[in-house]
Amino acid sequence: MSCPSHILAHSRKLRSAHRLLRHERATLVRWFSNGVRPSAPSAGAGDGILGVQGHGFATGEINQACKPSMRSPPSTDSIHYKSTNPALFKASSSGVFKVNVLRMSMKVEAPMAGLASNEGSQVHPKRCYSNDSGLPPHQEIGMPSLSPTMTEGNIARWLKKEGDKVSPGEVLCEVETDKATVEMECMEEGYLAKIIHGDGAKELKVGEVIAITVEDEEDILKFKDYQPSKSSAAPAAKGPSDSAPPKVEKVDEPATLPEPKVSKAAAASPSEDRIFASPLAKKLAEDNNVTLSSIKGTGPDGRIVKADIEEYLASRGKEAPMAATKVDIAAAASLDYTDIPVSQIRKITASRLLLSKQTIPHYYLTVDTCVDRLMELRSQLNSVQEASGGKRISINDLVIKAAALALKKVPQCNSSWTNDYIRQYHNVNINVAVQTDNGLFVPVIKDADKKGLSKISEEVKLLAQKAKDNSLKPEDYEGGTFTVSNLGGPFGIKQFCAIINPPQAGILAVGSAEKRVIPGSGPEQFQFANFMSVTLSCDHRVIDGAIGAEWLKAFKGYIENPESMLL
């Protein structure tokens, strides 16, 4: 019995076909027809896919032997496969056999475009072969996931036009993610046949088709009016919408349909002078100052039940918001205002901070640190930097270094929470909050405990400028283990409490330095000193109060004795 008959006969046994094709990234054929070619001999009970494997055909051999012939699109609902191993397939002398199918669309999940520098980025291309619509082989390029928290993105601008030839490594477009604007590169050679979403397209879901590429230049014109199929939408979004309405109907119909029929038929039987209501309904009406005579009961014999009171209260509650809405519209019409579009990074920042505040048990520890010696050391170091042509060192650079060394000394604070364990990091990577016109960015200084102050100062200035230019790359902001937010130096804020940047367990809020009067060594003696307030926000699931206090003690020691940071 030939190998094709083994594969095609008895299509009901193809449930285990995924075992045969598990090493392939594409689903070669969605459905097989029940019909078998008359010329094909009948198969026995054991002639399924597993039977083919039992005859000594390895999965890799069959995968290599079955290759789609793409020289010309088939004119009928069939796909031709050319045998590259005559020992395996003997269907005909030419080595070609036909597989009848019900559906011609075949899609291959394979990485096509994305960041060469970001191995963790997820791209959603689909390779489509010729189908019933007459379209030649092409590839659908989807919106890539260019950061771990990205769910949707915007197209900033296309660097390639329709009809342009693209090669691996060339930039197709710039994508605005939840973190920054990132270049999306092409990884295969071809031609850009169709741009589905042009410059400025907003809120495109990850995986949504944004462009079409083809291998042959003459196929470009065939995609002039191409529109992606709606079936490519995420199935997760379809599931709830398909299943939710039946559940609501099943709950509502039995409870509401029979009862009104009974109440209408028996409404005349009770006495008009007496109102019948259940004790629970009476209590609910009394608590909400509802007159029972204004409610029509839907219970047996026109009896007022709890559901009637709740329905009345709900309808009465709807009237007030409607009236308030009219007042708000009238008031808004008399105001002069401007609606500012919300950028993608602001949306994601808002959702992540809301999630942090709602799910992380914050608590706060504040301490005052004397920074006189720190300011003296900074002055001396800047003199050296100016003499050597280096960049000046700021108080924030010294704070980052002190925080990194304190994390090394108290590693429990350099951790994050998971449901099953606490992950303690061995690298000390400090995120630095930077405010820009586009929103809040937190670029990361990696291995800050191992770097000198001059190196930290250079990286902070470079990353801050890239954040303001909206040109940060994923490696510039991913992988942080702790965050420092300084509103003291640039804004003069005395003290504040910051929100933890998940999944981290702590963030340090730095206030401004101010001169204070402190007691002197003798009676009626006093002196002046500069103090800076810092507040540590802790995740109580990871950092207990004593551990947080121990970290602040170590941090204060480095700030008040800054020479120890240089050892």
Image (tube, rainbow, N blue to C red):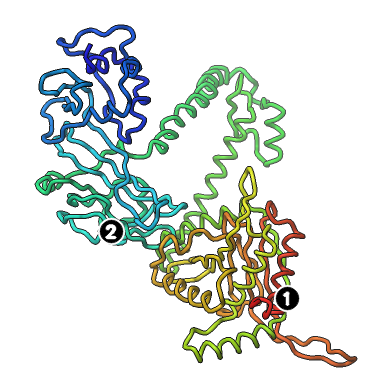
Q: Is residue 196 above or below residue 91?
A: below
Residue 129 appears in view: yes
Is tag 1's residue or tag 2's residue first in the polypeptide sequence?
A: 2
Q: Position of residue 112 (x, y in %)?
A: 29, 48
Q: Position of residue 516 (x, y in %)?
A: 74, 86
* Quarter of the image where one finds residue 510: bottom right
Spatial CA span between label 1 and label 2: 49 Å
Viewer-nearest residue: 391 or 343: 391
Q: Residue at position x 33%, y 36% from top?
A: 25
| Residue 390: assigned label | none
- From the image, tell me which residue sits under label 1: 368
Figure quadrant of the C terminus: bottom right
* Quarter of the image where one finds residue 314: top right
Residue 342 appears in view: no
Q: Position of residue 32 (x, y in %)?
A: 26, 20
Q: Amino acid at mark 1?
A: Asp
**Count of numbered circles in the view:** 2
Viewer-nearest residue: 551 or 177: 551
Viewed as shown, does residue 446 lie left or right of 401? left
- From the image, tell me which residue sits under label 2: 173
Viewed as shown, does residue 563 lie left or right of 212? right
Q: Residue at position x 21%, y 21% from top?
A: 87
Q: Residue furthest right?
A: 523
Q: Amino acid at mark 2?
A: Cys
Q: Is residue 65 above or below residue 231?
A: above
Q: Residues within 10 Å of mark 2 (few under 14, many from 20)?
A: many
